[in-house]
């Protein structure tokens, strides 16, 4: 009964998504294709006698930055070393890159021992945002904006450029993407998508709290269009205005994670990050 670790296919990953749902992580309904679009070699499964028992993703964005997520072991196989073995095998995929992750409190000491240092906390805020009356001024569908302009804006808010992921994320069926325009200039954008429980918003990037509020209201209205009155957004402590906005809209914190890194990252406009894209891919 030796653990065999190998790369996972997109089809394999449907099971891992189910595991994440069982853990209460509320994964998006159709996230995986966009994840695999960024780095199809970055997804791993541990199997015993052909049966999946562990999983992890280590997704490379460029030559200097990678992100780790989906660190999971099937409940009946925990405590047997399968997780650590899968972790070690998969982490080699990052090479010499700085690796980021969003770690739950129970695992943060383990991550520190593996060379990760905390940067800031992220809290998931959940609740019902009142629907705006009519269209929100200055917020338009993503197809009204040049892709290059949106990619350039996104690159200011994330530790690496991610054009492959972004194109797939915006085009995923069920994902609704909106852009905030001010005098023809992009001053924010956000995406809302169906999930197992509350609709998930991410990213939510904006120049100002007013821009973020306009996007949040419009995205909440979009969530209602696919049957979800409640939303969830992962709010970084590094931008205090983000938590204030969530509270003003009646959202309440549920659980928190810590963003951790193994090394330096390029500068990011943290004051623009009102909601991270996803805890699984950063």
Image (spheres, grey):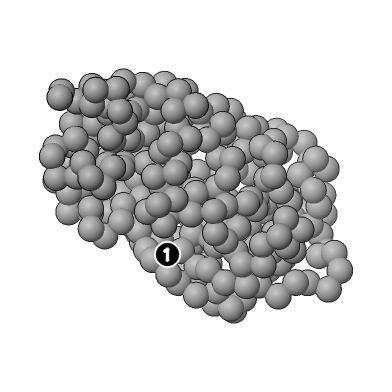
- Which quadrant is the C terminus positioned in? top left
Q: Secondary structure at mark 1?
A: strand
Left or right: 140, with 86 as reference point: right
Q: Is residue 12 visible?
A: yes
Q: Position of residue 53 (x, y in %)?
A: 28, 35
Residue 209 on image: x %, y %: 62, 68
Q: Is residue 272 left or right of residue 256?
A: right
Along the horizontal axis of the image, is 261 left or right of 177?
left
**Where 227 sits versus 150, above or below?**
below
Q: Residue at x 19, y 44 (%)?
A: 78
Instruction: Find disc 1 in the rendering and name its residue.
Output: 123
Q: Is the N terminus in the top left, top right, bottom left or bottom right quadrant?
A: top left
Q: Position of residue 196 (x, y in %)?
A: 54, 53
Seen from the viewer's position, the closer of residues 252 and 112 is 252
Residue pictured at 79% horizontal, 48% vertical: 141
Relative depth, front residue between 163 and 73:
73
**Residue nearest the observer in this picture, 179 or 36:** 36
Quadrant for residue 120, please give it: bottom left
Residue 221 higher or lower than 244, as above or below: above
């Amino acid at each position: 009964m030796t653990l065999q670790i190998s790369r996972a296919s997109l089809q394999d990953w449907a099971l891992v998504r189910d595991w994440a749902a069982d853990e209460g992580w509320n994964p998006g309904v159709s996230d995986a294709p966009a994840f695999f679009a960024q780095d199809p070699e970055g997804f791993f499964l541990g199997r015993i006698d052909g049966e999946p028992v562990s999983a992890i993703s280590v997704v490379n964005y460029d030559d200097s930055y990678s992100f780790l997520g989906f660190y999971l072991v099937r409940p009946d196989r925990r405590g047997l070393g399968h997780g650590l073995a899968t972790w070690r095998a998969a982490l080699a995929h990052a090479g010499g890159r700085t690796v980021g992750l969003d770690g739950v409190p129970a695992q943060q000491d383990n991550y520190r021992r593996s060379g990760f240092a905390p940067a800031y906390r992220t809290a998931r805020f959940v609740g019902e945002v009142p629907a705006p009356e009519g269209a929100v001024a200055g917020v338009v569908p993503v197809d009204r904006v040049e892709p290059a302009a949106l990619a350039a804006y996104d690159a200011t808010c994330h530790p690496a450029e991610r054009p492959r992921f972004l194109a797939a994320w915006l085009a995923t069926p069920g994902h609704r993407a909106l852009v905030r325009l001010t005098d023809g200039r992009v001053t924010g954008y956000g995406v809302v998508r169906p999930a197992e429980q509350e609709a998930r918003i991410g990213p939510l990037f904006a120049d100002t709290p007013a821009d973020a509020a306009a996007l949040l209201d419009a995205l909440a209205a979009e969530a209602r269009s696919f049957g979800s009155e409640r939303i969830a957004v992962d709010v970084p402590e590094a931008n205090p205005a983000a938590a204030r906005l969530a509270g003003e809209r009646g959202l309440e914190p549920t659980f928190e994670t810590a963003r951790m890194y193994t090394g330096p990252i390029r500068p990011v406009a943290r004051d623009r990050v009102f909601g991270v894209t996803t805890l699984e891919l950063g």
